[in-house]
Image: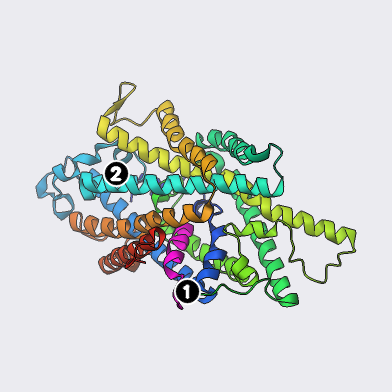
Amino acid sequence: MGAPQEAKTGIHPAFGVVFAMNYMMGSGYLTLPKAYADASVAIGVAMTFVMALGACVSAECILDAMDRAAWIVAARGHPARGGSFYRINAGDAEAATDAQLAAPRPAQLPDLCRLFLGSAGNNAYVFMLSSFMVGSMWCYAAIFGQSLKTNVGEPFGPRSYVAYVAVFACLVVPLSLKDLSDQKTTQAALAVGRQVMLVAMVATSVACLVSQGPVEPMPERATAFAGVAPLAPIVAFSVTLHHSVPQICAPVRADTPLVLNSMFRYAFLGAAIIYVLFAAPVATLFGAGTESASNLDWATYHHVPDPLDPNDALKRRAASVLGQFVVLYPAINVVATYPLNAITFGDALMATYREKCGAWEDRPSDLPPSASQTRFFRLVAGVPPLVGAALVDDISAITGVTGCFGLAMCAVLPGILAIQGQRVAPGPAPHATRLNGFNAAAGLAICGSLLTLSALGAALKVPGLA
């Protein structure tokens, strides 16, 4: 599509897969086992793979829209008689004068929305993104505080949770001011740690199921599909990274355009497999007693299988250490995920501000942003969720509502963007596949709309929608 994707320098696509999975797996996936238990494990598994496929279609729709936005920028200054490639009215692309389009980097989502959907579409996106990102980071900060409160204790009494959130703020705010390329080693290391934690949870769950069976039975349901509507936004929350597609693509070295398509396919498939292997046995083991943040079920490690003799001090100590690791690691993991989201949200806010206000520090909006401008907007994005997490720590309630905005952003909006991009700038694009053609994009937008309305009705308990 353009210079960033054709360049021979940059990070390897494998790091792009790591970044993509880190965006998705920011410990929000810990709410999946409870959702599986409430809806049934079979429905949870099916929903996870369906949502992962839809998320892949959505990411490729955004890639296609980014291609066509680059065409429109390239079309400026060319005569209308230059052929269909250049027969795009320059007035239609007036909003694309922002540096995000003009500079050699992928267009940002606000740019795409302004270009293809106008001011109304951009405003709708900013509202959805703001709601989703604040909710996501709120959830991550709450997970950190709860994990430490459960495992470390309450040295400050009732204010211990707030103190832990303050510690979290001291860790993540400085990281939010760094670029992604500066964090690849940290992100890769934490991704490995996350897999170790998941393996520990799955292994102990399966061992306990084999040796002594479920701790509690599954919860009773009014109907066979009673938990499906609440399940959808939680799964969507766990596979949403679409607001960050441009940021993930920007530093990746892609010798051919379809490298980026494959990168997202591997990321979504890998995430879906990990989610199912993790959530299914945990939900089966704890049943109705599954915590909203499932790692907290390991706080006392009461499900140690019989082969671990309670009279053996070494084995009891090993079990205790493993339980503490499972409870605490999500707190470490979100230290890496929170800055990724703050960077994305801050950059989107900055793009919106520059488009509407035109200048900052006497720096016109057609020039790249200054370092101080970038840092300011990332602080604006990253600080409010920390305040919210200090006030409210109910993770299930946060993810239930936040996931509705995730459904809209990862299904409805990308489908509409792809359809409109293909209308305004028709022709074969570098990232065009069957997964982002007109039929796939239209189906994505329609199904996404229905799921969003159903999930929102369930979250708000609106009769007739849930």
Identify the residue under disc 2.
Answer: 111
> Counting other residues with Cα less than 10 Å from the Cα at mark 1, is it few (<14), some (14-19), or many (20 or more)?
few
First-in-chain label (2 vs 1): 1
For residue 406, side relative to residue 155 (left or right): left
Identify the residue under disc 1.
Answer: 46
Amino acid type of the residue that numbered disc 1 sits on in the rendered structure? Ala
Q: Give the residue at the far left of this rendering.
A: 81
Q: CA distance from mark 2 to mark 1?
A: 35 Å
The rendered magenta stretch, by its main secondary structure, is classed as helix
Evaluate if marks 2 and 1 touch, with contact meaning CB atoms under 8 Å apart.
Answer: no
Residue 383 locus on image (x, y percent): 48, 35
Question: What residue is at 35 percent from the left and 49 percent from the top?
Answer: 128
Say if the magenta span includes residue 70: no
Residue 32 locus on image (x, y percent): 54, 63
Q: Is residue 383 visible?
A: yes
Choose top left, top right, bottom left or bottom right for residue 434.
bottom left
Check the image and report above or below for 459 versus 2.
below
Check the image and report above or below for 57 versus 189.
below
